Amino acid sequence: MKSNLVIIGMPTAGKTTLSTLLAKETGRRLISMDKELEREMKMSIADCFQRYGEGYFRDRESDLAARAGKEEGCVIDCGGGIILREENMQALQENGTIIWIDRPLEFLFPSTDRPLSRDPEAVAELYEHRQPYYRKWADIIIHNDRTIVEALQEILTIMENSK
């Protein structure tokens, strides 16, 4: 298994919760890309989208993906749209095992702090559009239609078995 564990998936799939628990459980440093981007931009992602547009945000995200991909021994919690640019995933995959948190559409929910998934229709559209990208890049698929503890245990078991 490569040095970093890179967590991808839809908004509200459980990425941040699983990443946080995985970092604690393994003693790895956590890089939360969305939190880091908000810190660097000095504004929320929603504000960034509103002020500068999605393209600006995606450029900042790509810059961070390039830097994060060079780190070692980290859990990298990615935003849901990281998979939209091939260069992001190539940078993260170079030294990372890509773990897709695949949560069924019926378990995903809209959120006002996520600019592209503010209502059920938008969530469904994103889900349909992004599924092939997540599948393309995933080294490991974790079906998160159960408890977070069960999903975490599956990741830890896979890691243990790949040693």
Image (cartoon, rainbow, N blue to C red):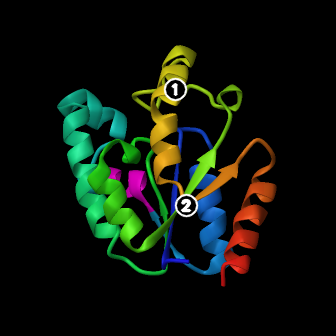
Residue at x 68% of width, y 34% of height: 104
Rendered residue at 64%/78% (across/down): 26
- Residue 155 position in % (x across, y down): 70, 65
Whole-Å distance between the Cαs marked 1 and 2?
A: 20 Å
Q: What element carries label 2?
A: loop
List x then y, in percent, for residue 160: 72, 79
The correct choice, above or below, for 16 with respect to 115 in the image is below
Q: Mark 1 points at which residue?
A: 128
Q: Is mark 1 on a helix, strand or loop?
A: helix
The residue located at (22%, 30%) in the rendering is 53
Q: Earlier in the sequence, mark 1 or mark 2?
A: 1
Residue 90 lies within the magenta run: no
Give the side of residue 81 with respect to residue 42, left or right.
right
Q: Do the residues labelled 1 and 2 touch (CB within 8 Å)?
A: no
Label 2 belongs to which residue?
139
Horizontally, residue 110 falls left or right of residue 32, namely: right
How far across and how far down the image is residue 40, in percent?
A: 26, 57
